[in-house]
Amino acid sequence: SPAGRGVFASEEPFLFVAWWTFVLSLVVTTLVSLVTPPEPPERLRGLVWREAVRDEELQANLRARLG
């Protein structure tokens, strides 16, 4: 490799850019999660595993659909 080109052969190596984009998105997602209030259980009904397992009506409907 020619002198002065650094470790990577191209100007913007994809994996290097992708790594820092991933880290930045992880930090932003975590910060937004911590700052925003949680959704009420009524809005999460049927969408979140924890709420779906605890919802007796939903579980009864699933059992009826399966058997």
Image (cartoon, rainbow, N blue to C red):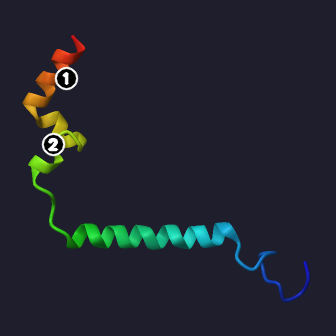
Q: Secondary structure at mark 1?
A: helix
Q: Secondary structure at mark 2?
A: loop
Q: Quadrant of the C terminus?
A: top left
Task: Report the residue at 30% width, 73% height from top.
Answer: 31
Mark 2 and mark 1 lie on one chain; the one further toward the N terminus is 2
Residue 37 location (% of width, % of height): 15, 66
Label 1 crowding class (10 Å Cα cut-off): few <14, some 14-19, many 20+?
Answer: few
Q: Is residue 40 above or below residue 19?
A: above
Label 2 crowding class (10 Å Cα cut-off): few <14, some 14-19, many 20+?
Answer: some
Q: Label 2: which residue?
A: 45
Residue 62 location (% of width, % of height): 19, 23
- Is residue 47 found left or right of 54 in the rendered image? right
Q: Residue furthest bottom?
A: 4
Task: Report the residue at 23% width, 70% height from top.
Answer: 34
Q: Quadrant of the N terminus?
A: bottom right
Query: For the residue marked with disc 2, what is the amino acid?
Result: Arg
Q: To which quarter of the image does residue 14 belong?
A: bottom right
Question: How far separated are the C-alphas under marks 2 and 1?
Answer: 13 Å
Residue 63 location (% of width, % of height): 18, 18
Q: Is residue 44 above or below residue 5?
A: above
Seen from the viewer's position, the closer of residues 65 and 10 is: 65
Q: Label 1: which residue?
A: 62
- Is residue 64 found left or right of 11 in the rendered image? left
Query: For the residue marked with disc 1, what is the amino acid?
Result: Leu
